[in-house]
Amino acid sequence: MIALYISSTAPYSGKSALCVGLGRRFQQDGYAIGYMRPVMTTKTCIGECMVDKEAELMLQTLGLKDPIGAIWPVCFDLPTVEAVLRGKGEDYRKLIKDAYAQVSEDKDVVLLEGGSRCVQGLAAGISCQEISAFLRAKVLVVDKYDVATTLVVDDLLAYKMRLGKKMLGAVLNAVPKHRLDFVQQLVVPFLEEHGVPVYAVLPLDKIFSAVTVGELAETLQGEIICRSDLANALMENLMVGAMNVDAALTYFRRKLNLGVITGGDRSDIQLAALETSTRALILTGNMRPSPLIISRAEEAGVAIILVKYDTMTTVQRAEEVFGKPRFHQEKKIARFERMLAERFDFAKLYQELGLQQA
């Protein structure tokens, strides 16, 4: 049985996407897989139960049946940190080992999704370096491209220093298209000369940071009052309509697949948005639009989300969800699987893991 730990150099670098992409590829090649998030930092209360919604979504996406409690054995939240600092923490290594034993039963490969940094959990003895050691896992590190290229190189070299032979290599993610040649011709050879094999260079694609209408409505505590059937439609860009109507048309036409935030009383802006590539109107101030707007939106296939907040508060809350997208929509997964098929060196990965390709 093989354990593959997916870590990253920063939050929201693409760990979940890579877990899904690799997991589905392993399944296509006939391997039984398991999935764990050994250490998480947030939890959601549903009744008296604590759940990790992201881990639960991952189980659904990969079609796994393991108990949710074994998927995330340790929540390193503030009470846990305080317990560790007071010397009253639990044996977190044992919790992870026991959960891993349960998840790995009858599996060929277990994917372990790590935290946002290599050192997360170090105070409790459950950092990436320590977990990969006591579970005998190989580590693949995802690095989201940064314009400061030296940061990309330095972060990955630092991982290599910490992990040594346990580090398989790296995946460079979200590289702007105009930087692809630079990365492939200079960054990749440099890393490989310094002992960090690069398994893929993945280009930036806006769809992976897109947010669904339903996710945005949930974040804003809003109500979808028109075209609720479009809850799974993806919005790639967020724009604010607070100008005159002539400027609004020019402004909205600059980008595609929009979520447009504007006041519920701005019918002129709403009509302008409906003439462009808008997926949802987000109307603030708890003011319902006119019947004309609703009728036009119905015909144009545009959802309308009614929110109680003012425009500034709505923008602030919406930007939070746009900065933390989920990766469980089938359209995103299919696009990412195609990208991996074209750009990921599966032959090298399978060789390093001792697996056979179909």
Image (cartoon, rainbow, N blue to C red):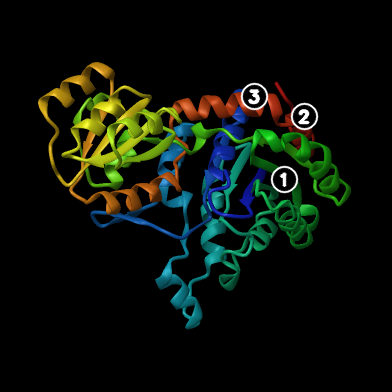
Distance between the Cα atoms at labels 2 and 1? 15 Å
Residue at the image position 32 percent from the left and 30 percent from the top: 246
What's the residue type where badge 3 is placed?
A: Asp
Q: Is residue 200 left or right of residue 47?
A: right
The answer to which quarter of the image holds residue 199 is top right
Q: Is residue 39 above or below residue 112?
A: below
Asked if residue 52 shows in the view, the reply is yes
Residue 96, how many percent across, how many down?
54, 58
Of the numbered discs in the image, which one, if any, rests on residue 5?
A: none
Task: Decide which of tag 2 and tag 1 comes sooner along the chain.
Answer: 1
Residue at the disc numbered 1: 170
What's the residue type where badge 1 is placed?
A: Ala
Q: What secondary structure is marked by label 1?
A: strand
Q: Nearer the viewer, residue 23 or 160?
A: 160
Give the class, few, some or many, for how many residues have Cα within 10 Å of label 2's Cα (few <14, many ≥20): few
Residue 11, how many percent across, how many down?
54, 53
What's the residue type where badge 2 is placed?
A: Ala
Q: Nearer the viewer, mark 2 or mark 1?
A: 1
Q: What secondary structure is marked by label 2?
A: helix
Q: Quadrant of the N terminus?
A: top right
Of the numbered discs in the image, which one, if any, rests on residue 347?
A: 2
Q: Nearer the viewer, residue 103 or 79?
A: 79
Q: From this viewpoint, which residue is outermost toward the bottom?
A: 86
Residue at the disc numbered 3: 29
Residue at the image position 26 percent from the left and 28 percent from the top: 303
Residue 90, how many percent across, how many down?
48, 72
Distance between the Cα atoms at labels 2 and 3? 12 Å
